[in-house]
Amino acid sequence: NRADTDPDPDTDTDTDKSGPIHLNIPDARQYNIPQIIRGQYNPGKIPENGLLFTDGTCFEHFFHPSSLDPMPRNFVFLVETSSSMQHNSKMQKAKKALNTFIDTLKPDDTFIIQSFGNKGTERLWGSGPGTDEEKQEAKQFVDALKPSSYRTDLHAALLESLLRAKHQAEISDDNVATILVVISDGYASYGETNRTKIAEHVYDLNAEGIVKIFNLGFQGSADMQLLDAIALMNGGVSAPILQGKPDISEQITNFLDSEIGSVLMSDVNVKYSTGSSKETNVFGETQKVFPVMADGYEVVVRGLIREPDSNEALNAVTSASTMEGMKNWELSAMPNSNDVMKSSLCFQSYAHDRITQLLGLYDASGFLGNELLKKLVTLSDKCEDEDFSKCIRGEALALAIKANVVAKGLTAMVTLDDDQCMEPDEDAEICLDGTTPDGTKPRDDDDYYYYDSYDGDHEESGHAHADEIAVPDSAYDGGFGGGYSDRDEDTSAASFEAKSDSSYRPASAPSYPRTDYYNSASAPQHSLVYSLVLFSTWFFMAVRKLW
């Protein structure tokens, strides 16, 4: 969560609106659709110990201490120089971004640059401090890098760079953050190519979590699933470099600046308790361990509370390594159930964050294994399945249905429309059926479907103005008991993806046709095709019999 801090801490006037802005996206069903999103924000600084809100059943915790000085950093930059990097000027743009970031390093930072291809280490520079002289020499080294290898030994490159990063951490003070940055463009094609083994070996070598691994991969060519898993397993972040989008070098620079540009804390850990005891009724928390926190970001943790008690305070203790050593921040809040709007936003925000967290773990579960998954997340309920990843997905699905959240690969959206939807609100940009504010409709599409009931745990059916329900994605395999409608009007169901012509098509839909799929205009053509098929079949059988 990005929080642009006040550039002048001494400024405190009514006209000063700089500072962190918290934008909460509420449950849109509370409002008059089609005004889809409405939010609240409060300009101002977060108190030094943070902000904590609870209604007794849900809580939100924001934390961003403004008094901390940036920590020194040890960097190892691992850059792929395989032949694929020459396409679309990827090598040149990656070098430009890396040199731009090198310019920002400070004298108390240290850094190493390692290129890889056929070998885990093709060329090596450093280590050196972030002085002007060393930075100039390092930039000349970067400029000389060229794509040359036809294969990629990603396994050896990761292990060798990780060993160098660990060595730098061992000879540094405790208040130094050690970070490995990977820029990759391909799959492992030489040496160890088993992706699960690569992820396991990196994790085993970095079991203490000393090195935080941040991965960047060129979308469409890099092994993003492996890079995502390695970052998740090693306290870092990964991101795709989008080709054909904004300048590649700018994407890389923005990622480095925002994630690790000015590190205020590392190994951030947040713990909760309720009442005066150390025991806690808190469960289902979103991420509460953070590898590093850069300036301009805030720690945000959300969760739920069992057996709420209006007389019991919720306590939070945040600990982290800082420039000044280990520090603790304590905070308490009494339940506030009077703010209905804030309570609703609390749960919806929690649902979105928790589902995102769980699906990220589920996507990487093939690399992680049950034991590591259990270390990375605590589920709300005990998992009885031998495959822990199934329990992760099950919790995400249950929460999505409860909160009516549409999540890719998990749930889909069903809209039930009526004539009122053809009269868009003057403040709306689009009506649920695709009607635009000026009253025009996008082109008709025979791929629109309609279901008049859902035969599942939910009882929503019939017609209501702009009614939306989230249902399991698997429901589109025939889980709608009402079947298809034979109404003449345009209706729709499925998860939608936008097209360039502003119309919408179902991203997934049943393969069998609805009863009114053919309209009156297409009926003659349909009959003709049917007759031709019958004639062809009869002719083939007759010839075969004569033969």
Image (tube, helix red, strand yellow):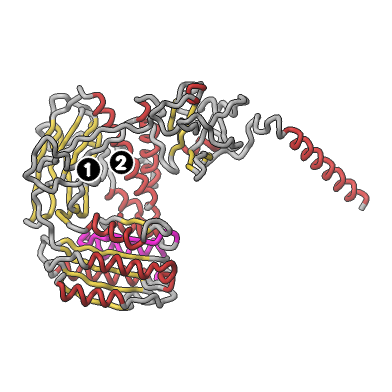
Q: CA distance from mark 2 to mark 1?
A: 10 Å
Visible in this render: residue 185?
A: yes
Q: In the figure, is residue 388 to the left or right of 487?
A: left
122 versus 500 height, above or below? below
Q: Which residue is mark 1?
A: 300
Residue 183 percent location from the top left of the image? 33, 65
Residue 544 is tagged as none
Figure quadrant of residue 263:
bottom left
Residue 365 percent location from the top left of the image? 37, 52
| Residue type of the residue flagged with mark 1 | Val
Q: Residue at x 34, y 30 (%)?
A: 27
- Secondary structure beneath dot 1 equals strand
Visible in this render: residue 225?
A: no
Check disc 1: other Cα within 10 Å, few if <14, some if 14-19, many if 20+.
some
Q: Which residue is mark 2?
A: 353
Please check the rendered image and state whether residue 210 is part of the magenta-colored stretch, yes or no.
yes
336 versus 264 height, above or below? above
Does the CB distance between marks 2 and 1 fall below 8 Å? yes
Figure quadrant of residue 358:
top left
How many numbered discs, if any?
2
Residue 241 percent location from the top left of the image? 37, 59
Figure quadrant of residue 215:
bottom left
Q: Residue at x 59, y 35 (%)?
A: 444
Magenta range is 192-220
